[in-house]
Image (cartoon, helix red, strand yellow):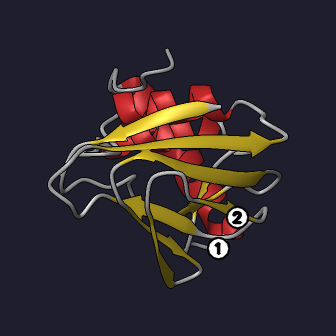
Amino acid sequence: MMDGVLPPGTDSGPARLHPQSEVRSKVMAGRANVTVRGDSHVLLPGESLTIAPGEAHSIRNRDDDILVVRTTLRPPGEFESAIRALYEAGAGGRPDLFAVAAVLSHYREDVRLAGIPWWLQLPLLSALARIGTLLGRNPLR
């Protein structure tokens, strides 16, 4: 379980999916605009949404107040470590392509980008992660 804090006007990064885990996102404060498989949902404090394994989703804070979303994955895997590493790589703001690729490559069983077929995503992430490591931009090393 992890509480994510999104300042006004920010989002959770590009649409992603969790190949092996069900996601439950509950709004603790603020108003969340959640997109699941292209369908938009607005969640208010106390409301939650369950997302099946493999379903693309993203969260955006379009309001003027801070958004706090409590996310639980079942099974949890290494979700919390993966998300923390992605935010350190700037996924919620101005991402470093090589750092994000290194994190997604490392945590590929827990989180993947949506919209790019896995057969293409895996070799691209692996190559970019290797380059990032050579450049000193791999946050996991």
The residue under the point 79% across, 51% down is 21
Where is residue 76 shown, x and y percent of the image?
78, 35
Residue hosting label 1: 117
Q: Residue furthest top?
A: 141
- Look at discs 2 and 1 and give the one toward the viewer: 2
- Badge 2 density bin: few <14, some 14–19, many ≥20, Cα 10 Å: some
Quarter location, residue 139 = top left
The residue under the point 22% across, 43% down is 7
Image quarter hosting the N terminus: top right
Residue 94 visible, this orientation: no
Q: Earlier in the sequence, mark 2 or mark 1?
A: 2
For the residue pair 52 and 67, the one nearer the viewer reads as: 67
Residue hosting label 2: 51
The residue under the point 47% across, 28% down is 85
Q: Is residue 82 above or below residue 14?
A: above
Where is residue 130 shown, x and y percent of the image?
50, 35
Q: Residue furthest bottom?
A: 39
Q: Is residue 40 above or below residue 95?
A: below
Between the residue at mark 2 and the residue at mark 1, the CA separation in whole angstroms equals 19 Å
Where is residue 106 shown, x and y percent of the image?
63, 34
Q: Amino acid at mark 2?
A: Ile
Residue 1 as seen in the image, left or right of residue 140: right
- Badge 1 density bin: few <14, some 14–19, many ≥20, Cα 10 Å: few
Residue 16 as seen in the image, left or right of residue 20: left
Q: What number is the disc on residue 63?
A: none
**Circle 2 SS class:** strand
For the residue pair 27 and 133, the one nearer the viewer reads as: 27
